């Protein structure tokens, strides 16, 4: 079912059927069994609105969970320095100026953009997964502009706790004032 409201068209069943189904179930629980799928447009609008709200809340929760707590991010910062990530990567928060690999300023947003890019063929579904993959299996996807580098990223075999900490630290990074932006795609 595709509905149009003003200039906005949507198709919840095709794109996110489980959210539409959940929203309809919740609506039925609140209003009794009088709610029928495919009913009037007001029911569809309510279900659609609930689905959008569920997506927004879910994405926000995932971002907060992925960024982790302050102690987790602090542990990630320690690991970033202990593993000498800054020998290859520039990151203002760690005061590193490496030049053999992609810059890590604003890496959370860069990672999210890479996963959404049609040219990305790795296994990650989100920014946190992309960073995990980049750390543990860096050959799965080579960042644009770095495929021909003679300094290949090594694969790290970290404990789940250390990997979570490092990913949380990297996701929390925003471009530092005065930081150089990487060339397009990096």
Image: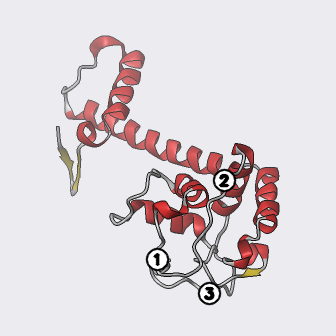
Q: Residue at x 62, y 87 (%)?
A: 180
**Which circle marks residue 180 in the picture?**
3
Does label 1 or label 2 sit earlier along the sequence?
A: 2
Q: Residue at x 27, y 40 (%)?
A: 12
Cα–Cα span, label 1 and label 2: 28 Å
Cα–Cα span, label 2 and label 3: 23 Å
Q: Is residue 135 left or right of residue 183?
A: right
The answer to which of 135 and 186 lies nearer the viewer is 135
Whether residue 91 appears in this view of the structure is no
**Which circle marks residue 67 in the picture?**
2
Q: Is residue 89 above or below residue 13?
A: below
Does label 3 or label 1 sit earlier along the sequence?
A: 1
Q: Residue at x 71, y 57 (%)?
A: 166
> Most extreme residue toward the front, as rendered?
150
Q: Is residue 71 left or right of residue 166?
A: right
Q: Is residue 84 above or below residue 96?
A: above
- Residue indicated by mark 1: 147
Q: Are marks 3 and 1 in contact (CB under 8 Å)?
A: no
Residue 115 placed where, x, y %? Answer: 44, 60
**Residue count near mark 2 (Cα–Cα under 10 Å), binned few <14, some 14–19, many ≥20:** many
Residue 113 placed where, x, y %? Answer: 45, 65
Which is closer to the viewer, label 1 or label 2?
1
Q: Secondary structure at mark 2?
A: helix
């Amino acid at each position: 079912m595709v509905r149009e409201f003003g200039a906005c068209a949507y198709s919840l069943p095709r794109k996110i059927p489980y959210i539409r189904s959940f929203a309809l179930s919740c609506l039925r629980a609140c209003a009794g069994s009088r709610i029928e799928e495919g009913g009037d447009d007001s029911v569809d609008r309510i279900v659609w609105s609930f689905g959008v709200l569920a997506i927004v809340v879910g994405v926000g929760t995932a971002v907060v969970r992925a960024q982790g707590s302050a102690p987790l991010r602090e542990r990630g910062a320690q690991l970033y320095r202990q593993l000498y990530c800054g020998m290859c990567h520039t990151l203002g928060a760690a005061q590193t100026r490496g030049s053999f690999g992609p810059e890590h300023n604003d890496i959370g947003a860069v990672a999210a953009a890479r996963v959404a890019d049609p040219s990305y063929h790795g296994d990650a579904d989100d920014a946190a997964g992309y960073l995990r993959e980049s750390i543990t299996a860096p050959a799965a996807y080579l960042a644009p502009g770095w495929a021909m580098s003679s300094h290949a990223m090594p694969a790290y075999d970290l404990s789940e706790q250390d990997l979570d900490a490092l990913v949380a630290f990297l996701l929390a990074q925003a471009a530092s004032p005065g930081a150089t932006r990487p060339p397009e795609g990096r």
